[in-house]
Amino acid sequence: MTPCKRGKKAPTAAGVDRIGALPDEILHHLLSFLPAQEAVRTCVLARGWRHLWKFTTGLRIVEFEGARSVQDVRKFVDYLLILRGDGGLNTFEVELSEFSEDDVLYVNLWTRFAVFCKVRALTLHLHHNKFLDLEGLPLVSRELRTLDLRGVCLRRAFLDFSSCPTLEDLKMQYCQIDVDKISSLSLKRLSIIFCRSDQSHRVRVSAPCLISFTLDSFAGRTPLLESMPMLETAVVELGGACSDFCHSYRTRGFCGANGSRCVYCFSYNDESSNTVLLGAIYNAKHLRLISPLGMVIFARDLKSCPTFNKLKTLLLNGYWCVGPDFDALTCILKHSSSREAHSSVCFRVHKVEMKGSYSSTEKPTEISEHLKLISVKYNVVDDRVLQLLKFMCTFNIRFSFE
């Protein structure tokens, strides 16, 4: 039997612009995801598209068809901003690889233009072997909510956000931070990743409403944190470029332990606070504290740090597991006696995992019975691991392999 033929669909009317038939507000939003050059090119699609690009809700100034530097795009961007006008923006993004000294003024003008257009999310990413200097004047915006910076130099009052009352997210990567203070009463999430400061004094961080804080591989003197009572999660990883290093560590231990003096240890807090980091983040529920050997910050902070009363999870590395006395480890466990919830501690010594827990049937110790779980990860059982396990057993911690 000859198979029956399917009926043919009615032909679509030629030349119908189905996308162009969408409401203008949707088209403005869709065009904002395109590089600005591509968005402008849509003006040749049809008469109805001629002016749509002028009203996009976002502008993306990014690398495009060989245009990698600020100089390659600045003439285009200048005309773009003039023709577009000062209509509102949700997002403004600049991401380029190269710039010259002559380009610095243009990037600063573009940034101020975006703020003038009431931008909500501002991104400046410069991938170059030197930092681009941003003006030292503070931003003034009641609409700015997110600020993402990379490859820029921040000076004077730029990081004073007292005139940005709705700013909630600040992320800085590979930036030069030469300011006295980072301050905001509205900031909720702050990330400082692979940044540096060449100042002789510490950068102060005043953000009392933070709920999430990340400090990773900061070069120079570690920033000094002020109180963060609402903090929930904190990640602090001190890198090898941190200048808070005790040069006497390998021969005599940390300065102060034996009455000796060291400029890095005894001036570590600028004499303005008892702690640099831990005194501000002790309210966090989840902590990750990583440091190379020889850094003084955590060891000195613990001497004046209050108890981590809300702590639920704590991730440490081998810095805390130095025998034979394990002073730093003992101190951090004493300070981690959470009464609100059971807490767990994870030591990343290597890769394989072994878990342990507090034994309530044994004689109580100075380590809190609220400590629910301890996890030790390693790949080779060497003397260092054996010393750690033996030490933990003195606090009624019983381990099992999984």
Image: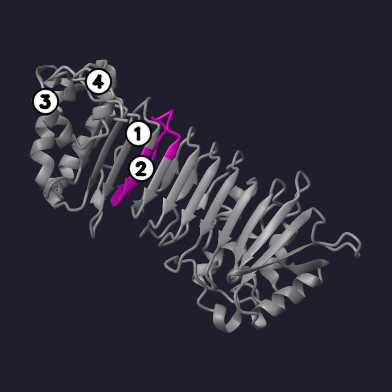
Depth check, front residue: 348 or 355: 355
Residue depth check, mark 1 versus mark 4: number of the one nearer the observer = 4
Q: Which residues are magenta?
A: 147-169
Q: What residue does disc 1 label?
A: 121
Residue 184 sits above or below residue 4 on the image: below
- The amino acid at mark 3 is Leu
Check the picture and name the quadrant holding the N terminus. Answer: top left
Name which residue type carries label 4. Answer: Lys
Residue lying at 55% horizontally and 81% vertically, measured from the top left: 250
Instruction: Give the amino acid at mark 2.
Output: Asp
Give the residue at mark 2. 148
User: Earlier along the polypeptide chain: callout 1 or callout 2?
Assistant: 1
Marks 2,4: beta carbons within 8 A: no
- In the image, which is nearer the foreground, mark 2 or mark 4? 4
Mark seen at residue 45: 3
Residue for badge 4: 9
Residue 76 location, x and y as percent?
9, 36
Q: Outermost residue, front direction?
A: 1
Image mark for residue 93: none
Q: Main secondary structure of the magenta part?
A: loop
Q: CA distance from mark 1 to mark 4?
A: 46 Å
- Whether 293 is among the magenta residues is no
Q: Earlier in the sequence, mark 2 or mark 3?
A: 3
Q: Is residue 118 left or right of residue 180?
A: left
Residue 95 drawn at (x, y percent): 24, 45
